[in-house]
Amino acid sequence: MTSKILLYYKFQPIAEPEAVRLWQRDLCEGLGLRGRIIVSPDGINGTVGGALASCKTYVRKTREYFRGMEFKWSEGSAEDFPKLSVKARDEIVSFGVPGELKVDEHGVVGGGVHLSPEGVHELVRDRGEDVVFFDGRNAREAEIGRFRHAVVPEVETTHDFVAELDSGKYDWMKDKPVVSYCTGGIRCEVLTSLMRNRGFTEVYQIDGGIVRYGEKYGNSGLWEGSLYVFDGRMHTEFGAPNDPNFVQLGHCVHCGGATNDFYNCANEPQCRAQYLSCAACREGNPYCGRCTEARAPGAS
């Protein structure tokens, strides 16, 4: 049976998020889909997987309410998710500033200019080294893939971005053309709005995010490495495994060997870190770098 994973979002005002949550839950349960969906007063964000026919039905029925919503299709299935989770929250993406984002029937108000993958290359061609790529994801995700020479904020969660922007450490970018990027584009919808509110004058975002860019250019463009994804696959690549243009960025925290495999630290629940490890090191040492140091003989 052919299966797929859907990635999607839509910013539009929702008067009754709880009613939409219940509808989405019942729809997914009836179709046998699993994944994660968040509904807020500003719209919807989801990643679900299941049988191809079920995914097609889900797209058709969901578009009856969220008209014009785009879906990105990728390889995978319901088995890539532990369960179905459908929640109603104050924000689609938890930046911690629910009152700051403005949304109307056309989407986010005051966000960055959308660039197609081709448009990104045109901007770089015209503006050269003035263009700054700004990673809108958590720093962990950038360990295995990022745009060449990108600025990667040292943030552990999306909540950390507001404090980062307010810290002043990125003020040097405020008069430069800044291209913000994230997995599918949704985090940048909010982030670029927050950046413009804080004085960044020329802000762009990649339409469809890294996913759409990778579909267009694979490993032959400005992207380097693998893409972190939030399901059982943990990462995906653009192109064949033996692609000569592929750049390996991820390395094991223990031996330094090449790897893109993330694991949860075995020191749970005290440590919730996710770290890169090769299979051999993981078998002998299932702990993150910090916990490994703390467990070493003589460690205080």
Image (cartoon, rainbow, N blue to C red):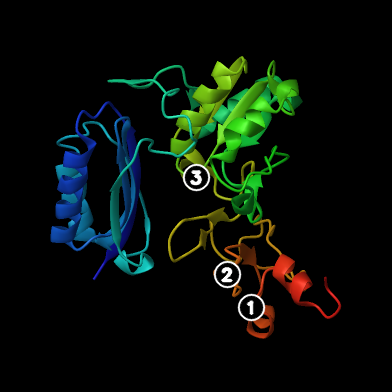
Residues under numbered marks 1 and 2 in contact, where contact means CB atoms less than 8 Å apart = yes
- The picture quadrant where one finds residue 4 is bottom left
* Depicted 18 relative to depicted 193: above or below: below
Residue at image position (38%, 66%) is: 80
Q: Which residue is mark 1?
A: 286
Secondary structure at badge 1 equals loop
Q: Earlier in the sequence, mark 3 or mark 1?
A: 3
Q: Is residue 117 left or right of residue 290?
A: left
Q: Residue furthest front?
A: 300
The amino acid type found where label 1 is placed reads Pro
Question: Against 104, is 38 above or below?
Answer: below
Badge 2 crowding class, 10 Å Cα cut-off, few under 14, some 14 to 19, many 20 or more, is some
- Could you say which is closer to the camera, residue 148 or residue 19? 19
Query: What residue does disc 3 label?
Result: 183
Disc 2 designates what residue? 263
The three-letter amino acid code for the residue at tag 2 is Tyr
Give 211 or 280, whichever is nearer the viewer.
280
